[in-house]
Amino acid sequence: MPWLGAYDRTVFSLGEYVPSFLWGRTDLIYPSIDPLDDKNRELSVQELIGILTSAALAATTHPSQNPPFHAPALRLQSDGSFAPATQPEDLGLLFRPIVTQISRWDHLKGFLPLLQGFSLLKERQAAQRTEQNKQRLGLTRLVLAGPDPDGVQEVLREVCEVWGGLSPELQRDVAVVKLPMVSPEENALKVNALQRCSSIVAQNSLQEGFGLTVTEAGG
């Protein structure tokens, strides 16, 4: 209260959050997404492929008019390090069925349960009723992506440890990806491109508010 007395107006996202001493000088702006923002705007095929290659999310032998991003997407490697996401091979975002979750590295986001569930699904590939389903599941990859933390992040470390315990075959089908925040615009375009390449965008949160991630994906 002592620090807010000098302000003429305040903005909250929900009426229940407004303390009584601010009634009468508060505006409510409900959570929403901007369809023209780099994270949400429509992308042409050429733009999509250009972003993927510039961000090191897809490999190409073709010349490109798009320069590399300032900071490429980084993918967990078998030795525990991170390298551009096209290593050790292309992710197949343009060709494979992709299941993606993009969130901050937080226990509430449910990264580990999603990874464990995907592992169980892969183990049951042989039990699929049709050859088409077996082939589809065999090609499916899981992408777990989040911002590149400034320091050691406990949840990211746990995800890396669990990934390290997977079989080599399963490791190839699960990509743990860090999206650098050096440029907010480039980060937003990476998220946009990843979501547009995904067959399923998951949000396995144990607790969530408005759920911007799934709203962005639906848009």
Image (cartoon, helix red, strand yellow):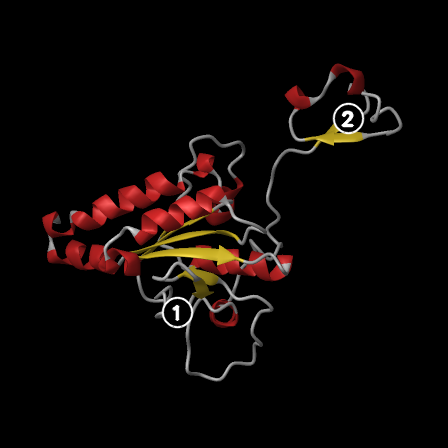
User: What's the mark number on residue 87?
Assistant: 1
Q: Label 2, label 1: how many angstroms apart (C-alpha)?
A: 50 Å
Query: Dot 1 lies on which element?
Result: loop
Query: Dot 2 lies on which element?
Result: strand
Judged left or right of residue 53, residue 100 is left
Q: Give the answer, above or below, for where 30 lies relative to 118.
A: above
How dense is the environment of label 1, judged by Cα within 10 Å: few (below 14), some, or many (20 and up)? Answer: some
Residue furthest top as drawn:
20
Judged left or right of residue 174, residue 130 is left
- Mark 2 and mark 1 lie on one chain; the one further toward the N terminus is 2
Q: Could you tell me residue 173's position as x and y percent?
A: 29, 58
Judged left or right of residue 114, residue 39 is right
Tell me the quarter of the picture where residue 202 sits.
top left
Q: Which residue is mark 2?
A: 26
Q: Could you tell me residue 215's position as x and y percent?
A: 50, 43
Look at 16% across and 47% down and name the residue there: 124
Question: Which amino acid, mark 1?
Answer: Gln
Tell me the quarter of the picture where residue 29 sits.
top right
* Residue 218 visible in the picture: yes
Q: Give the answer, above or below, for where 14 lies relative to 172.
A: above
| Number of marks drawn | 2
Look at 25% across and 47% down and name the residue there: 119
Residue furthest right as drawn:
6
How dense is the environment of label 2, judged by Cα within 10 Å: few (below 14), some, or many (20 and up)? Answer: some
In the picture, which quadrant includes the N terminus?
A: top right
Judge depth for marks 2 and 1 and give the one in front. 1
Q: Give the answer, above or below, for where 126 lies relative to 26.
A: below
Look at 25% across and 56% down and name the residue there: 170
Question: Which amino acid, mark 2?
Answer: Thr
Look at 45% across and 55% down and name the residue there: 195
Q: Could you tell me residue 107's position as x and y percent?
A: 45, 36
* Residue 105 visible in the picture: no
